[in-house]
Image (tube, helix red, strand yellow):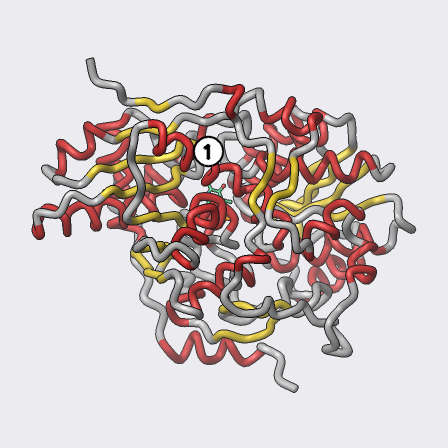
């Protein structure tokens, strides 16, 4: 009998997150005030976030224990299974061992619930009963809606107009959990009204929706807080549970990864699977190839400059050091909605910059070919975002086939693709386009990156 799945005993689920801040090879570049360009004090973040999360944003502690109330909700679907992809290996004829961590088994279908539950909890214990956020494809909005319901809180989601119109089922999912979903840009905020007056036919963007959600929190006199699904240190911290579990699971079968792979939108699931292995590379000299995968249509790390930039179009967020295509960049309409962000988490950018990790970009047609190979061997329809990680895992396994090496490859399956069948449909009917952005397009997009 083949043991496909490596389960972790629920009693051995990690009870602390891993914080990479004390283990960085260079100092963390601080977020800067959007107007004065001075490092911001944690205090300045208190309009948006509760004290528990602000502490985590700057914590020097390597381990941060997970409160019991959060563990209780995590137990609804965690520990998640680690799978050995025997059938995919066989199809490829590779001597490599391929493992994947299956985050698609969460109630929202992706890794995002790992942080939404924690964020709802820290808000609740500080007396907050209402959260606002933005959502692009709908995955983050779904995750926050579920988390808010678990802690009996209200949730308002600004959903990018094009998704609001094209993805009615994601909208219904959020409403099922009691969230209020508003098409962005909307007339409920000053910034939304300004955009609507200037560009009434806009499809909206994540940058615009973030500005709207932040405005609501700022103008609420402390009643409403804002919640972000990726990019920030505390979000990456919460996602470390993925890699911590995977490490324990691999250890239980006497294995250790040579290659660790994840797809990158803002960088949170990638950080989640990789960061717990980083000290082994930096301090113990282990050779691990960490690969961050992004789409060629939104080539943040492979082609963007390393610079301070805003997180949103309305320039309301602090300036964050990152790779960026410019906060006004609106990427082509590729089908991995979760990977269309103009920037990336400071922590991931720093480790790529320092050469601890490397970034690669892949086209969407080869990604969908990989998605089909995976679905047809492993029986799971992956999210197009996760397909980026699968593509590179397959490419690495094929390199092993050529060289005869038997490497251990680990990747994160960030979510399932059950709400993405329109994308599969486009691929199957041959309508999917590959985008190679011209340098002139990128150069003009980068013009908005602030210089001082
Ligand atoms: C949101 C999302 C991503 C991208 O976000 P990260 O913060 O980079 O992890 C990737 N995969 C899935 C399934 C998502 O929902």
Question: Relative to 436, does residue 95 appear above or below in the rendering?
Answer: above
Residue 69 visible in the picture: yes
> Most extreme residue toward the top, as rendered?
1
Q: Which quadrant is home to the N terminus?
A: top left
In the image: residue 376, left or right of residue 303: left
Question: Relative to 164, does residue 439 appear above or below in the rendering?
Answer: below
| Picture residue at 20% right of the left edge, 28% below the top | 86
In the image: residue 68, left or right of residue 249: right
Q: Which quadrant is home to the C terminus?
A: bottom right
Residue 83, position as x, y percentages in the image: 32, 28
Residue 338 visible in the picture: no
Question: Relative to 369, does residue 205 appear above or below in the rendering?
Answer: below
Residue 104, position as x, y percentages in the image: 44, 30
Element marked by disc 1: helix
Residue 330, position as x, y percentages in the image: 51, 63
| Picture residue at 54% right of the left edge, 59% below the top | 345
Residue 375, position as x, y percentages in the image: 28, 30
């Amino acid at each position: 009998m083949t043991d496909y799945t490596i389960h972790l005993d629920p009693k051995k689920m990690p009870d602390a997150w891993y914080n990479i801040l004390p283990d960085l090879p260079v100092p963390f570049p601080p977020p800067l005030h959007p107007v004065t360009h001075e490092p911001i004090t944690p205090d300045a973040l208190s309009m948006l976030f509760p004290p528990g999360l602000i502490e985590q944003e700057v914590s020097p502690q390597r381990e941060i224990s997970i409160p019991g109330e959060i563990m209780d909700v995590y137990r609804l679907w965690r520990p998640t299974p680690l799978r050995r992809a025997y059938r995919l290996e066989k199809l490829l004829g590779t001597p490599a061992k391929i493992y994947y961590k299956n985050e698609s088994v969460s109630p929202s279908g992706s890794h995002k619930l790992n942080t939404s539950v924690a964020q709802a909890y820290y808000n609740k214990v500080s007396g907050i009963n209402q959260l606002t956020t933005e959502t692009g494809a709908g995955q983050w909005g779904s995750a926050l809606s579920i988390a808010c319901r678990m802690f009996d809180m209200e949730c308002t989601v600004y959903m990018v107009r094009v998704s609001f119109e094209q993805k009615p089922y994601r909208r219904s999912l959020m409403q099922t959990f009691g969230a209020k979903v508003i098409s962005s840009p909307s007339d409920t905020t000053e910034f939304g009204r300004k955009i609507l007056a200037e560009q009434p036919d806009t499809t909206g963007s994540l940058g615009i929706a973030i500005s709207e959600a932040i405005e609501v929190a700022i103008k609420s006199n402390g009643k409403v807080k804002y919640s972000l699904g990726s990019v920030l240190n505390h979000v990456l911290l919460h996602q470390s549970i993925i890699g911590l579990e995977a490490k324990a699971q691999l250890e239980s079968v006497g294995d250790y990864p040579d290659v660790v792979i994840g797809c990158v939108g803002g960088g949170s699931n990638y950080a989640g699977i990789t960061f717990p292995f980083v000290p082994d590379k930096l301090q113990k000299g282990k050779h691990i190839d960490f690969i961050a995968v992004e789409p060629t249509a939104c080539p943040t790390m492979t082609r963007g400059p390393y610079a301070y930039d805003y997180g949103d179009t309305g320039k309301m967020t602090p300036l964050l050091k990152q790779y960026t295509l410019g906060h006004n960049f609106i990427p082509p309409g590729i089908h991995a909605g979760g990977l269309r962000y103009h920037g990336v988490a400071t922590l991931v950018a720093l480790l790529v910059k320092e050469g601890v990790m490397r970034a690669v970009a892949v086209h969407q047609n080869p990604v969908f070919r990989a998605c089909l190979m995976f679905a047809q061997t492993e029986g799971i329809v992956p999210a197009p975002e996760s397909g980026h990680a699968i593509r590179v895992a397959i490419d690495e396994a094929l390199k092993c086939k050529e060289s005869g090496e038997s490497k251990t490859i680990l990747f994160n399956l960030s979510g399932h693709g059950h709400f993405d069948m329109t994308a599969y449909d486009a691929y199957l009917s041959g309508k999917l386009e590959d985008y190679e952005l011209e340098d002139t397009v990128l150069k003009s997009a980068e013009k908005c990156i602030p210089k001082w």
